[in-house]
Image (cartoon, rainbow, N blue to C red):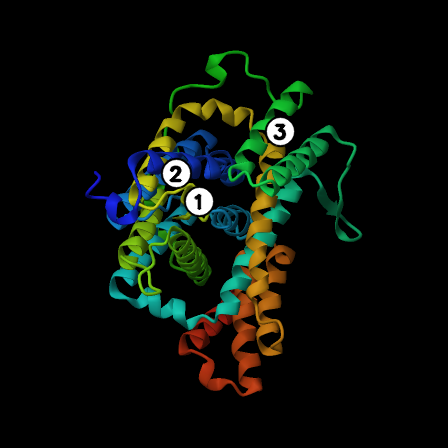
């Protein structure tokens, strides 16, 4: 183990890697409850989702650690799960089984694109500002979903949206959770989101707003069956042949593209394992990430991606793939805690969505706002996601505006041909919807 993970070369040891893996797990353990709550809005079985989430995270993290030897953990991605549930299934009316097929196809295509080197070419074709705008827009969308789940934002016939009943005990519980999580993160506690959920659940129990466990069976129980969702992605592949599903698959791919690239760069830089400014074993890392999406789709969950929370483990010394392997083990151990799904209600998970949205929205600072031909498509990308309740629509609008504003500005040579192709696809997408 010491030689395989190159402890001496990286200046680490088993104890450090173990602590790093545990830290990473605690920083991203919230996904065990947030993902089932998010995807269950589609009618999927929450117990099966819990198991699929834990297994997808374990498998993806294990492959990343063993094959790519990166201290990067994987799990079903925030933003991608919201897109799956609220846009694809609830918005477009696409059955969740077909949506899972779309996730599977996106994962398979990403594996092929990675192995052929095309993935890197496509990544380079998208301007940096639009990449950051997509990430920030998804952050606003997730936060908007969290505010709705908390009851803080409600429907208003006069103004479309309005503020909820702030005297409602459940709304107050969600606000409390948001404050606690914010405070914990502000004082530097890496697992602040997870600990915030625990504290909020306890307070909810005290005031009778959250179900109270009456015994050990309400905390630890048998692993929920995967049967309701397992393999559905394979059984509905014949239903993906439409313009609408093409856009869905492209969106899954696009978001996974840049989530992974950005996370790997951030973690590798912090861990000090970059070589001459480049990612070592980049192909293996990208393949591991794409494979995680394939496995996750078959298990029955939305796209699996690399988690930036891995920087929490790196911050305490994690540098090798063993960090990711340890994280994978903890996700497997977490399988027996499925009864806690009854305790972790939407008011408890809502603050996690809002905080993750804040973290993702920080990418707005990298957009070139002083260049109007860049600012306009970036702005519409960000704005249209929450306003149309669709990540795909935000991406589509921004990518249609980009070649137009750049052409008018006379920056034709800077527009990659792939951007024209994407613009045409998205125009067809809107035409099909109308």
- The image quadrant where one finds the C terminus is bottom right
Closest to the observer, 199 or 107: 199
Q: Image check: 24 left or right of 194? A: left
Q: Is residue 136 above or below residue 206?
A: below
In this view, the mark in front (2 or 3): 2
Using the rendered image of the protein, determine whether residue 231 is visible from the camera's viewpoint.
no
| Distance in Å between CA atoms under marks 2 and 3 | 26 Å
| Distance in Å between CA atoms under marks 1 and 3 | 26 Å
Which residue in the protein does label 3 denote?
A: 200
The percent position of residue 245, horizontal first and vertical second, equals: 43, 58
Q: Do the residues bearing badges 1 and 3 touch, measured as CB atoms within 8 Å? A: no
Q: Is residue 132 above or below residue 176?
A: below
Query: Tag on residue 20?
Result: 2
Closest to the observer, 210 or 421: 210
Q: Secondary structure at mark 2?
A: helix
Which residue shows up at 56% across the image and 28% down it? 198
Closest to the observer, 380 or 358: 358
Which residue shows up at 44% across the image and 29% down it? 47
| Distance in Å between CA atoms under marks 2 and 1 | 8 Å
Label 2 vs 1, first from the N-terminus? 2
Which residue in the protein does label 1 denote?
A: 315
Query: Tag on residue 387?
Result: none
* Count of numbered marks: 3
Q: Do the residues bearing badges 2 and 1 touch, measured as CB atoms within 8 Å? A: no
Q: Do the residues bearing badges 2 and 3 touch, measured as CB atoms within 8 Å? A: no
């Amino acid at each position: 183990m010491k030689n395989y993970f190159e402890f001496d070369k990286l200046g680490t040891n088993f104890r450090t890697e173990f602590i790093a893996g545990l830290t990473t797990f605690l920083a991203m353990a919230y996904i065990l409850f947030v993902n089932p709550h998010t995807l269950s809005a589609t009618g999927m079985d929450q117990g099966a989702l819990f198991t699929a989430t834990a297994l997808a995270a374990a498998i993806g993290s294990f492959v990343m650690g063993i094959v790519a030897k990166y201290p990067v953990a994987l799990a079903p991605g925030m933003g991608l799960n919201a897109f799956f549930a609220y846009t694809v299934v609830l918005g477009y009316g696409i059955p969740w089984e077909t949506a899972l097929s779309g996730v599977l196809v996106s994962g398979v295509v990403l594996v092929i694109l990675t192995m052929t080197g095309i993935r890197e070419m496509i990544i380079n074709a998208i301007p940096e500002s639009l990449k950051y705008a997509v990430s920030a827009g998804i952050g606003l969308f997730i936060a908007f979903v969290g505010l709705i789940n908390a009851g803080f934002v409600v429907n208003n016939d006069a103004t479309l949206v309005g503020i909820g009943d702030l005297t409602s005990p459940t709304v107050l519980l969600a606000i409390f959770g948001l404050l606690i999580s914010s405070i914990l993160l502000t004082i530097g506690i890496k697992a602040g989101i997870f600990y915030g959920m625990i504290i909020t659940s306890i307070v909810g129990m005290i005031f009778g707003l959250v179900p109270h466990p009456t015994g050990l069976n309400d905390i630890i129980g048998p692993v929920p069956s995967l049967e309701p969702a397992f393999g559905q992605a394979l059984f509905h592949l014949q239903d993906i042949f439409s313009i609408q599903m093409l856009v869905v698959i492209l969106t899954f791919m696009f978001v996974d593209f840049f989530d992974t690239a950005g996370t790997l760069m951030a973690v590798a830089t912090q861990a000090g394992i970059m070589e001459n400014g480049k990612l070592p074993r980049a192909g293996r890392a990208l393949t591991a990430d794409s494979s995680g999406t394939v496995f996750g789709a078959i298990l029955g969950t939305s796209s699996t991606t690399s988690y930036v929370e891995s920087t929490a483990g790196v911050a305490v010394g994690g540098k090798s793939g063993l960090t990711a392997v340890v994280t994978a083990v903890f996700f497997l151990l977490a399988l027996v805690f499925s009864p806690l799904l009854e305790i972790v209600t939407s008011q408890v998970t809502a603050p996690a969505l809002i905080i993750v949205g804040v973290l993702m929205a920080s990418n707005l600072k990298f957009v070139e706002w002083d260049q109007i031909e860049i600012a306009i498509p970036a702005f519409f990308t960000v704005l249209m996601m929450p306003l149309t309740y669709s990540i795909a629509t935000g991406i589509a609008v921004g990518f249609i505006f980009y070649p137009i504003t750049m052409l008018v500005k006379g920056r034709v040579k800077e527009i990659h041909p792939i951007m024209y192709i994407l613009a045409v696809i998205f125009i067809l997408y809107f035409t099909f919807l109308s």
